[in-house]
Image (cartoon, rainbow, N blue to C red):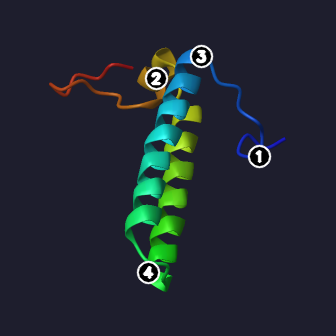
Amino acid sequence: MNNRAKYTDVNEEKQNRIDDVRNMFSDVYDFIENNCKPSRETSLAMTKLEEAQFWAIKGITREEPEEIKNITGSIADENGNILF
């Protein structure tokens, strides 16, 4: 199965961060629902928030372990020395 379609297990640390993201977005959803009249603009704002929440959580689930990040990330340090 393509990696993009697979379910990604997360460890406890990542799950806690995902829960924090959901809780923060929940507060924003509540604020908008309580302070903005129903309108096309409000609907668009809510849709964009849902999208932002999706991508924030997706970003957490797709983070690579540090040792992999170093290999696939930059190949030079801040002085321009080649690391790999």
Asked if 56 appears above or below 13 in the picture, the reply is below
Label 4 CA crowd tier, 10 Å (few <14, some 14–19, many 20+): few
- Cβ atoms at labels 1 and 4 below 8 Å apart: no
Q: Name the quadrant of the N terminus.
A: top right
Seen as rendered, the residue at the extreme front is: 34
**Mark earlier in primary sequence (3, 2):** 3
Query: Could you say which is closer to the camera, residue 83 or residue 46?
Result: 46
Q: CA distance from mark 4 to mark 2?
A: 44 Å
Q: Secondary structure at mark 1?
A: loop
Rendering coords of residue 65 (x, y %)? 52, 20
Instruction: Look at discs 3 and 1 and give the one toward the viewer.
Output: 3
Which residue bears the numbered disc 3? 12
Label 2 CA crowd tier, 10 Å (few <14, some 14–19, many 20+): few
Identify the residue at horizontal 49%, vertical 28% (top origin): 17
Identify the residue at horizontal 53%, vertical 18% (top origin): 13
Asked if 57 appears above or below 81 in the picture, the reply is below
Q: Secondary structure at mark 4?
A: helix
Query: Could you say which is closer to the camera, residue 24 or residue 76?
Result: 24
> What number is the disc on residue 71?
2
Seen as rendered, the residue at the extreme right is: 1
Q: Secondary structure at mark 2?
A: helix
Which residue bears the numbered disc 1? 5
Rendering coords of residue 50 (x, y %)? 54, 58
Which residue bears the numbered disc 4? 41
**Mark earlier in primary sequence (4, 2):** 4
> What number is the disc on residue 84?
none
Relative horizontal placement of residue 49, taking residue 76 as reference (left or right): right
Q: Amino acid at mark 1?
A: Ala
Label 3 CA crowd tier, 10 Å (few <14, some 14–19, many 20+): few
Q: Amino acid at mark 4?
A: Glu
Q: CA distance from mark 2 to mark 1?
A: 24 Å
